Amino acid sequence: MHSVSIFLPDDRATRQLGKVLAKSLPKRSVVLLEGDLGTGKTTLVQGIGESLGITETIVSPTFTLINEYTQGRLPLYHLDLYRLQPAEIEIIYPETYWEWVEVPPGITAIEWAQRLPYKPSDYLNIHLTFNLEGGRQAKIERVGELDFDLGILDSEFPNLNLE
């Protein structure tokens, strides 16, 4: 199974998705988040941080570009590319946060990942959209050789659609 689709009725469910993912994501995982403003990208990252035991308030790094949270079970690196053009993104060297040479291995979450001029070889792609009936839809795709079983979401989200 390489992709699933999940209906998320509210912020609590979106945060819960982040918590469930973080429980099983291995060290050196990259989560690429795509979606319009307000679809829940930061809320999902907050759930990841909560599950990692990070007690700091997790906010979108829209203006700081990168927030590093290092006091959890694994470090969490949170990037937000909303205000950047592809040439500007190259200057901040996002690969630093998936090559793990200059930072300790952890989990990297990148909001507005569709703006990346290049991507890592292995990652979890999450595309969030608004649902016409309310809530959100999350399409989650495992790309490359990321050691993560999407099937673990089945027990937590009964409305899971396998693709």
Image (tube, grey):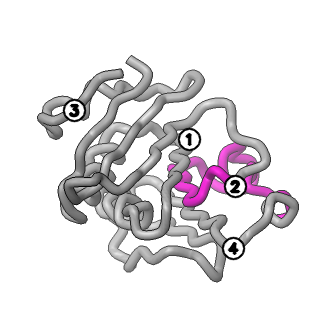
Mark 2 surroundings: few (<14), some (14-19) or many (≥20) residues within 10 A: some
- In the picture of the structure, the residue carrying the numbered disc 3 is 160
Q: Tell me, yes or no, whether the two marked residues, 4 and 3, touch with CB atoms within 8 Å.
A: no
Give the residue drawn at x 16%, y 35%.
159
Q: In which quarter of the image is residue 83?
A: bottom right
Alpha carbon distance from label 1 to label 3? 26 Å
Element type at mark 2 = helix
- In the picture of the structure, the residue carrying the numbered disc 2 is 115
- In the picture of the structure, the residue carrying the numbered disc 4 is 83
Q: Give the residues drawn in magenta, as a range.
A: 90-115
Q: Tell me, yes or no, whether the two marked residues, 2 and 1, touch with CB atoms within 8 Å.
A: no
What kind of residue is marked 1? Arg
Q: Which of marks 4 and 2 is nearer the N terminus?
A: 4
Mark 4 surroundings: few (<14), some (14-19) or many (≥20) residues within 10 A: few
- Nearer the camera: disc 1 or disc 3: 3
Alpha carbon distance from label 2 to label 1? 21 Å
- Nearer the camera: disc 2 or disc 1: 2
- In the picture of the structure, the residue carrying the numbered disc 1 is 28
Q: Tell me, yes or no, whether the two marked residues, 1 and 4, touch with CB atoms within 8 Å.
A: no
For this view, does 116 lie left or right of residue 82? Answer: right
What kind of residue is marked 3? Leu
Element type at mark 1 = loop
